[in-house]
Amino acid sequence: ELGYGKSAPGTANLSMSTNQLAERFGAVSMTLEMPFKDHDANRDAEFAWSPERCKGLAHACLETLAGMIDEI
């Protein structure tokens, strides 16, 4: 319902980096799209994006991939 439609086998748009990486290396590839409203003019001191939050997101993504590695 949400997200991009799936391409038929052999018809992926290889100008998109995620598709190119998956095709070229047979690797899991994903795009993380985030609505980004945290900037200097609208900074949220409590919930602002930070290096620590970035690391937490990276860990969460890797944990998810590790949990499904045997299925892919």
Image: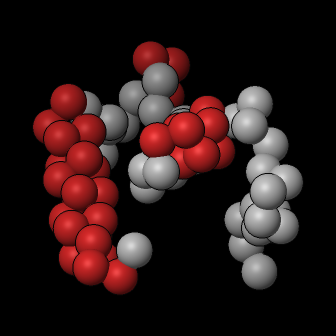
**Number of disc labels:** 0
Residue 53 visible (yes or no) = no
**Residue 26 picture location, percent across and down:** 47, 51
Residue 71 visible (yes or no) = yes
Image height check: is 41 above or below 7?
above
Image height check: is 38 above or below 8?
above
**Residue 3 picture location, percent across and down:** 72, 65
Tell me the residue at 83%/67% (across/down): 8
Asked which quadrant contains residue 36, the reply is top right
Tell me the residue at 84%/54% (across/down): 11
> Quarter of the image containing the N terminus?
bottom right
**Residue 19 picture location, percent across and down:** 64, 45
- Foreground residue among 16 and 45: 16
Describe residue 22's horizontal placement relative to residue 56 as left or right.
Answer: right
Image height check: is 3 above or below 13?
below
Tell me the residue at 79%/57% (across/down): 10
> Quarter of the image containing the C terminus?
bottom left
Tell me the residue at 20%/30% (across/down): 51
**Residue 38 picture location, percent across and down:** 46, 33
Describe residue 36's horizontal placement relative to residue 5 as left or right.
Answer: left
- Foreground residue among 16 and 60: 16
